[in-house]
Amino acid sequence: MAPLRTLGFASLTPRVLEFLERNKIVTVGDFVSQELDSGVEDPEIQKFKSELATFLEECHGKWENGDEMLQKNLQAGSLSTGFESLDSLLKGGLKDGTITELVGPSSSGKTQLCMHSAACVAYHHKFSVAYVDASSSFSAERVLQMMCGRRCSSIAIEDDVKEAMRRIFCFKVYDVHGLLEVLHSLYDPASSFPGPVHLRLVIVDCLASVLSPILGGNNAQGHTLMMSVAQILKSIAINRNICVLITNNTVAAEDEELKPALGESWKSVPHVRLMLAKDHDNNSCTVTLLKHTSLACDAEVTFCFDRG
Amino acid sequence: MDDGGSIARLGLPPYLRSKLLACGYSSIADLHGASPLDLARDASISSDEALSVLRRIGATPAPIAGAKTAWDLMSFDRSRSRIGTGCSGLDRVFGGGVASKELTEICGAPGIGKTQLGMQLAINVQLPRSLGGLNGHAVYIDTEGSFMMERVLQMAQRSALVTPDQSVESLLSHIFYFRVFDSTEQIATINSLNKFLEEHKEVKLLVIDSVTFHFRQDFHDLALRARLLNSMAQKLMALAHHHELAVVLVNQVTTKGNGEIRPALGESWSHACTNRVILRWEGGKRQACMFKSPSLPPAKSSFSITTRGIGE
């Protein structure tokens, strides 16, 4: 919140300014949080208060009632992950306006599932995908294999596959500041996205790689930056009506169990949390529903990534 | 309304940040349109400091313009060469050889051949593309003192037979060797690599043998260790990407409670590498097994270590 002075109100006369300075009110936040007893009968201050009140009315979003929210929810589209069993577990797939988190130990299939969803959305749904790769694990060759199975290892690649590959935009980030830059430009409608765009899926793989080096220890800003990331992800999902898919690592907990990284504060950020486990002997991946805003948890499905 | 994020994004020193927060500037949108004079007066900072704050906003170009599509990346992937290991089965496990712009981890028990493989790659990267090399130089960071000059000489002599225009001296002189003695030195060396690589643009391979050694003993604060290793991994990824290097990290193994062997440095390090290859003994032969890769299926192959280097 910027200082009140910069808002450029006509009612901000020198007398009002002096009054504010006397009461040590600098920002809008200070003004609304203070109980002003003295000086409120002054007509100039009253005029200023009403102008500020109108300004604040325009700033906050409009009120919605439960029925409007339900209609919105029922109309929200969903994107398929490419696996029928997983889509039916999620009652349709990845829902618009939600953040879905994939948690799992190393090599459990999180990146594979992200690439599979990107391939499915770009090829079948024909929407654009923004893939933010924070762990250097995106493989375009693998995405191609997922789009067209065995036939793509040979020479000719069909035009529709080429078009689909051109709908997936990859960004490489190596630290939290790079990640915030990319996410803010994805959110900002003024930034020009190359090519014809209908961005419906944003994938961030893997959030823990850029967030864990800054959490804990002497870094006082680590937690703030993590919550900034949470805020921009939620803005992208809810205000732009986009599906957000993120991955998180696991860390060792007591008695050899594994728990999701990034701690307790991160738990409330995703709307849906899925735990992945890989069975290396028969190459199958089991997905368990850990958290969902409207479905019962602990349901699980198993599927195989086809090895192309 | 996008407020551009909190001012924590700008990476300001704590005293500047708290002064800005105290006078009401808490997000980047608040700083837009503020003149240096106003900012200096409100926050009681000097005009130089105000200018430096405002300069940090909008300093980087919009990343959207530089986005590459999956199609562009695939065309690049298909055109890049990989570094051959000298054993065709091992090359198959690696998907044709060790790839550049990726972090490849090689773990195994002592004596299985991790250092041998690292040294062989440092020689092979210098070969011409037709022979499985990249015509590039190598950087070898030795943390354990296991780099053996005599052995590298043997490998170089075998290579020099195949490539007459690359003498043994030239092969040896293009391996840049760093010896580090503790974890701080290791981190400092990696931090200074960016500058080194700017000056030596032919370097195409970085081997760190082993990345584990200094982080296993004397590190009581495991949370700090995980943070340091994670940030080291991110720096290595950035180096691999900007300088188009293949990065090979050698890791040791540790035993779990029930006697099972697993790679050292714990769960958090497992996520750091792009590819993970585990070397083990099976039936009297050395086996390599691709354990984690975004694009390659799990594959196994046996290999051997001869007087001339890595072989079938």
Image: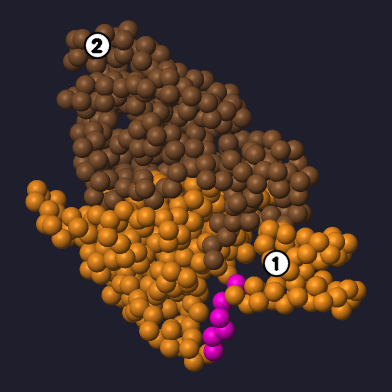
Residue B253: where, in percent of width, then height?
47, 40
Colour scheme of the rendered structure: by chain
Q: Is residue B31 left or right of residue A293?
A: right
Q: Chain of mark 1?
A: A
- Density class for disc 1 (Cα within 10 Å; few <14, some 14-19, many ≥20) is few
Instruction: Name the foreground residue: A220 vs A139.
Output: A220
Residue at image location 34% in from the left, 27% down from the top: B204
Residue B69: where, in percent of width, then height?
29, 51
Q: Is residue A53 left or right of residue B245?
A: right
The quadrant of the picture occupied by the C terminus of chain B is: top left
Q: Closer to the observer: label 2 or label 1?
A: 1
Instruction: Give the amino acid at mark 2.
Output: Gln
- Density class for disc 2 (Cα within 10 Å; few <14, some 14-19, many ≥20) is some
Rendered view: A281 above or below A220: below
Question: Residue at label 2?
Answer: B166
Residue at image location 71% in from the left, 48% down from the top: B38
Which residues are drawn in magenta? A59-65
Q: Quick check: can you spot residue A63?
A: yes
Colour displayed for chain B in the image of the structure: brown
Q: Which chain is orange?
A: A
Residue at image location 59% in from the left, 40% down from the top: B55
Residue A10's disc number: 1
Same-subunit check for callouts 2 and 1: no
Instruction: Name the foreground residue: A57 vs A206.
Output: A57
- CA gap between label 2 and label 1 equals 80 Å
Instruction: Give the amino acid at mark 1.
Output: Ala
Q: Does the magenta-highlighted stretch encompass residue A4?
A: no
Instruction: Name the foreground residue: B124 vs A64.
Output: A64
Instruction: Name the foreground residue: B225 vs A244.
Output: A244
Rendered view: B268 above or below A38: above
The quadrant of the picture occupied by the N terminus of chain B is: bottom right
